[in-house]
Image (spheres, rainbow, N blue to C red):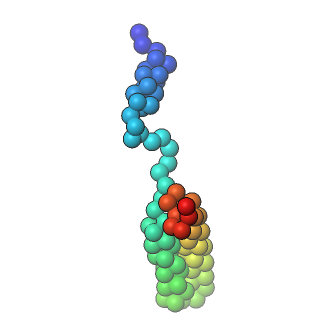
């Protein structure tokens, strides 16, 4: 009977031998994050303009907040890129 320990050790050996194998989360593309941020910011502006009464405040503030979070993520992803232009 095979134990889970042996099979996981075999998988680790196979994964380590492959040169293109990468463990963990992949980096997000800053352009994609910026695009998503602009979409959320546009939704926030449209909700402030199109909705009536006090209902425009709740979704508008929420959408603008989510857009700013994505914009912050895009800026961080851009600054953490390994191939930044202008650096040696």
- Where 25 falls versus 16 (above or below)? below
- Where 17 falls versus 64 (above or below)? above
| Residue drawn where x is 52% and y is 78% of the image | 41
Please state the horizontal and vertical placement of residue 19, each as a whole percent of the image. 40, 37
Quadrant showing the C terminus: bottom right
Give residue 10's quadrant in the image. top left
Quadrant showing the N terminus: top left
Q: Is residue 73 visible?
A: no
Q: Is residue 86 visible?
A: yes
| Residue drawn where x is 45% and y is 42% of the image | 22
Q: Nearer the viewer, residue 69 or 9?
A: 9
Task: Indicate left or right for 88 with 35 as reference.
Answer: right
Please state the horizontal and vertical placement of residue 66, each as a whole percent of the image. 56, 70
Q: Residue furthest front?
A: 88
Task: Indicate left or right for 48 with 18 as reference.
Answer: right
Please state the horizontal and vertical placement of residue 14, each as a whole percent of the image. 40, 27
- Where 60 falls versus 22 (above or below)? below
């Amino acid at each position: 009977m095979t134990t889970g320990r042996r099979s996981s050790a075999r998988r680790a050996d196979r994964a380590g031998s492959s040169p293109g194998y990468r463990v963990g989360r992949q980096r997000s593309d800053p352009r994609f994050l910026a695009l998503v941020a602009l979409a959320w910011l546009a939704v926030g502006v449209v909700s402030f303009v199109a909705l009536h009464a006090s209902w425009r405040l709740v979704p508008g503030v929420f959408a603008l907040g989510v857009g700013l979070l994505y914009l912050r993520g895009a800026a961080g992803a851009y600054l953490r890129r390994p191939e930044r232009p202008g650096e040696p």
